[in-house]
Image (cartoon, grey):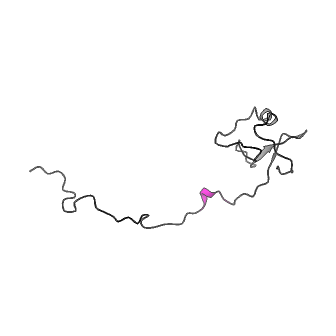
Amino acid sequence: RSSDLMPCLKWNSPEAMNMGDRKEFLSEVQLKENYCRNPDNDEEGVWCYVSHPNITFDYCNLNYCDSPLDEEELVDQAGRTTTEEHHLFFDEKTFGAGDRKS
C-alpha cells in the first residue's frame, strides 16, 4: 500500500502500463505484482501507481536503513581462509637459479 493507504496497482496492469509508457525505468529493477519499487531512481524513494482520480502514483512508507549495506564497515580478518595444508610447488634449493645452461 502507498503512504496514503491506497492500494498499489500491479505493474503489468493496463492502467499502470498506460501511466508509465513515457517513463524510462532501470532494467535491473524487477517490477512484480503491485510491490512498491523505485524503477526510475526517484530521490524520494519507492513508489507505486495508484488508481485515483487526481494522482497517478504515490510513495510508499518503508523503514530504510541508516546507511546502505555496502557502506557498512567490514570486520578486518587476518590469516588464511582455508584449513588445507600449504605445500610448496617449487624446489627450495634451486628456486631463483633460473635455467642455467651447462
The location of residue 29, given as percent across then percent down, is 67, 43
Q: Is residue 35 magenta?
A: no
Q: Residue at x 77, y 44 (%)?
A: 34
Q: Is residue 82 left or right of residue 17?
A: left
Please state the total of marks drawn on the protein image: 0
Q: Residue at x 84, y 42 (%)?
A: 50
Q: Nearer the viewer, residue 35 or 23?
A: 35
Q: Nearer the viewer, residue 75 or 15?
A: 15
Residue farthest to the left, as pictured:
102
Q: Residue at x 65, y 39 (%)?
A: 27
Q: Nearer the viewer, residue 2 or 22?
A: 2
The location of residue 63, given as percent across then percent down, is 75, 58
Q: Is residue 71 magenta?
A: yes
In the figure, 75 relative to 5: above or below?
Answer: below
In the figure, 34 relative to 75: above or below?
Answer: above
Q: Which residues are magenta?
A: 66-72
Q: Is residue 86 left or right of residue 92?
A: right
Q: Residue at x 25, y 58 (%)?
A: 90
Figure quadrant of residue 94: bottom left
Residue farthest to the right, as pictured:
53
Q: Is residue 44 left or right of residue 88?
A: right
In the figure, 62 relative to 77: above or below?
Answer: above
The location of residue 11, given as percent across then percent down, is 76, 40
